[in-house]
Image (cartoon, rainbow, N blue to C red):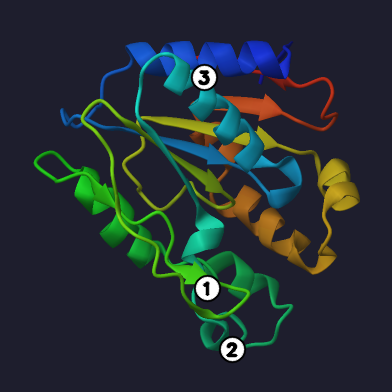
Amino acid sequence: MRLEPITWERLTDALAGYLDDLRPADGGPWLKVAVDGAPAARPGELADAVAAELRLLGRDVLGVATSGFLRPASLRYEYGKEDPDAYYGGWFDTGALWREVFAPLEPGGGGRVLPDLWDPATDRATRSPYRRLAPGGVLLLHGPFLLGHWFPFDLTVHLRLSRAALARRTAEPWTLPAFERYETEVGPVDAADVVVRADDPRHPAWTGLP
């Protein structure tokens, strides 16, 4: 994998410009983008920055965090609160993401997306209102373990941390085996369209655009 240094500002501008020219692969009116990465890599920050730049270009954008689509605590903690296998395969409600986020953005869909479903703090439904994404709009889904589910993304960006950087910056070390499993089973560096090395948050590097 060949990487070249870049600043976050240039990276954001490049991604936004690329997406502004990109057309959805399914022929529908909405682009669907993944910003994949462990919480320690802060994928939400990059997604927010790209969203802000796209809005300046006149695009309607909806950012959705997978942390808003957690399963209830009774399911997440069925095998204990620090089970890495449960975290990897059982914490995030991929069925709800398909139903509430991707299905409305299929060709012929109404574009009416639920931005979040479950509040982990209260362990209750958020009851957030639906958000209608205008034709030509862009969905930016961000969070860990986004690849390998056959989600219909038009562009996938993976924020990569080395094993040492991930261990150093992860607040919950019990989750580390889940990310090792993700690397082994999914291989996000090979699966993603764009890879960004974020070991040093001040000096990222990337593979460039597809």
Above or below for 13 versus 116: above
Examine the rendering and report whether any part of residue 67 can be seen. Answer: yes
| Sequence-first tag of 2 and 1 | 2
Q: How many marks?
A: 3
Q: Residue at x 45, y 50 (%)?
A: 148
Q: Is residue 161 left or right of residue 89?
A: right
| Sequence-first tag of 3 and 2 | 3
Label 2 and label 1: CA atoms lie apart by 9 Å
Circle 3: residue type = Glu
Q: Nearer the viewer, mark 1 or mark 3?
A: 3
Examine the rendering and report whether any part of residue 2 can be seen. Answer: no
Tell me the SS state at disc 2.
Answer: loop
| Sequence-first tag of 1 and 3 | 3
Label 3 and label 2: CA atoms lie apart by 41 Å
Residue to which mark 2 is pinned: 78
Tell me the SS state at disc 3.
Answer: helix
Are the residues at dot 2 and dot 1 in contact (C-beta closer than 8 Å)?
yes
Residue to which mark 1 is pinned: 90
> How many residues crowd around disc 3 within 10 Å: few (fewer than 14), some, or many (20 or more)?
some
Circle 2: residue type = Glu
> How many residues crowd around disc 1 within 10 Å: few (fewer than 14), some, or many (20 or more)?
some
Label 1 and label 3: CA atoms lie apart by 34 Å
Q: Which numbered marker is on residue 150?
A: none
The answer to which image quadrant residue 161 occupies is top right
Q: Nearer the viewer, mark 3 or mark 2?
A: 3
Q: Residue 1: where, in percent of width, then height? A: 66, 21
Residue to which mark 3 is pinned: 53
